[in-house]
Image (cartoon, rainbow, N blue to C red):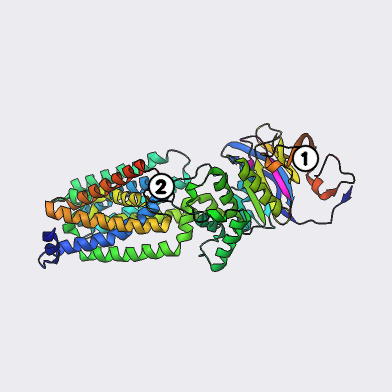
Amino acid sequence: MVQREAQRDIVVRFEGVAFSYGDIPVLENVHFHIHRGEFIALVGPNGAGKSTVLKLILGLEKPNQGGIQILGKGPEEARERIGYIPQHADHDPSFPISVREVVRMGRLRGFQRFRPEDEEAVDRALAQVEVEDLAFRPFSALSGGQRRRVLVARALAAEPEILVMDEPTTNMDAESESRLYKTLGKLKGSTTILIVTHDTEFVSALTDRVLCVGKRAKDGKAHALVQHRTMRIAESPPELYGGQVAKVLHEEALPEDSCCIEVSSNVGGKL
Amino acid sequence: MRGFFSALLDPSLPFLRNALYAGILSSILFGVVGAVVTVKRIAGLAGSISHAVLGGIGLALFLSAHRIVPDVPPLAGALVFAILSAFIIGLVSLKAKQRVDTAINAIWAIGMSLGILFLAKTPGYTDLMSYLFGNILFISSQNLILLAILDVVVLFLAYRFYPQLEASAFDEEFAKVRGVPTEGLFLAILILTAMAVVLLQTFIGLVMVIAMLTLPPGTASHLARNLASLMVWGVVFSFLFSFGGLALSWIFDLPTGAVVVVLAGAVYLVAAGLKAIRPGGLVRR
């Protein structure tokens, strides 16, 4: 093994992070980092704390212990450079708003008003996710899968350096899911992608590394985080991740710095 | 109806023209603030604030009658109570993890009860019904000027901060990620709503303000495609209800506030019924 190029740009770094909701411990001693351009799957069972990790990255929650750096800054300073796709189970169907207006929200920056270049960015984002034809339809008139793709366009409208997605394929039809992974495939490499999924067994074959929340910490209450490698599955059903699927090898936990070390022989598929 | 129009032009009936001006000026607040109250789903909070305002009115009348603070206008007491209750309700909603509805109802009940207690100990006759249900005879030029000022402020803020308002109402968490101070915005909306409630109560009454902050936007929601058009249609409907209510109450000698609300409620129900018959809504989408 040899050290990879000395300092690959690290865009997300968690150092000994602990977090609890009141008296209920959720995360304990969480260490991990993500390099620029990586495609990371954050997996774990329901209630393990995956969404909490996202909220910590976005600065919506603050850790009780440890440090978090996003793009070399604190989460609150960096979050405008993050594209966020929430899980969004609670959409209000009576809210009057068009698809274009939803996507334009991605261009919001504090108290600033929209500028002409924001409209151009909205056009690009609509095209990237292939929802241009829906632009002037009411958001509430869309199917669940279409709505989810519009929220992806909203996140992309910000032209983010990091794209953070919380279970984006929940309730999504196979065609929408396939289109989403096609879009993500195009973004891979240029945008750092962190995708949360509760499917702990399989992830998209686009995935570089899997971070798994769910291993109990020493006191047996909060969860820690471990890394696993994946193995590409040759024949996958087309309705899952657009037909490009990898299996998570849970039996093997990788050291935190494994991504910074070159493996001399490629074992068990692409990491 | 001709009698109503000639009464509007009659120099000996200035209060009716004042009521019409108040209706026009109120419509802007009903439509714009009402649209925000509707999409933010804070009608319950606004209802609590509007009822708690009676405490402030009672306190002002009590202090004035006992010469503790001479000549303090009821409007000043109402404003203090409205802003205070908006602040408490806002903080409870943001910070408390549970029992928010209990706290909101407590503010509602305590505010009203304090108002009744202060009025009971205030010498002389006080027309409680006028405060609760509105009285167009009470609309002064000062009221109209204050309504006009608040209209301008609300229109400016709605225009200047429209993207932030829209985003925080549609998806508060996302708006926060995009750098919008959503909690501060929420408190500002509540305080502005509280100030609107105080100025609107002379036309429509404390008890019925909340109806006019919800029914016109509710009717408008069948036509609106976005928040801006919800505001515009809300203003249009509010004006039609206010004008129609004022005319009907004049013709049939009925309390204006109640007629306005019944008219707004009837149209809202008819629109909702039509929507139920035509599930696609009143507008082809």
Task: State the CA–CA distance, disc 2 to disc 1.
Answer: 45 Å
Residue drawn at point x = 37 percent, y = 62 percent: B154
Q: Residues within 10 Å of mark 1 (few under 14, many from 20)?
A: many
Q: Position of residue A190 (x, y in %)?
A: 72, 57
Residue B279 falls within the magenta-colored stretch:
no
Magenta-colored span: A35-50
Q: Residues within 10 Å of mark 2 (few under 14, many from 20)?
A: few
Decide if residue B3 is in sight here.
yes
Residue drawn at point x = 30 percent, y = 55 percent: B237
The dot on residue A269 is none
* Position above or below: A236 against A40: above
Q: Quadrant of residue A255?
A: top right
- Check disc 1 and report its element: helix, strand or loop: strand
Q: Chain of mark 1?
A: A
Q: Position of residue A123 (x, y in %)?
A: 58, 61
Q: Chain of mark 2?
A: B
The dot on residue A230 is 1
Q: Nearer the viewer, residue A69 or A185?
A: A185
Identify residue type, mark 1: Thr
Q: Nearer the viewer, residue B170 or B58?
A: B170
- Check disc 2 and report its element: helix, strand or loop: loop
Which residue bears the numbered disc 2?
A: B41
Q: Position of residue B173 (x, y in %)?
A: 53, 50
For the residues bearing labels 2 and 1, Cβ distance under 8 angstroms: no
Identify residue type, mark 2: Arg
Q: Nearer the viewer, mark 2 or mark 1?
A: 1
Residue A44 falls within the magenta-colored stretch:
yes
* Position above or below: A213 against B51: above
| Side of A196 relative to B86 (left or right) | right
Residue drawn at point x = 54 percent, y = 43 percent: A144
Q: Nearer the viewer, residue A23 or A36?
A: A36
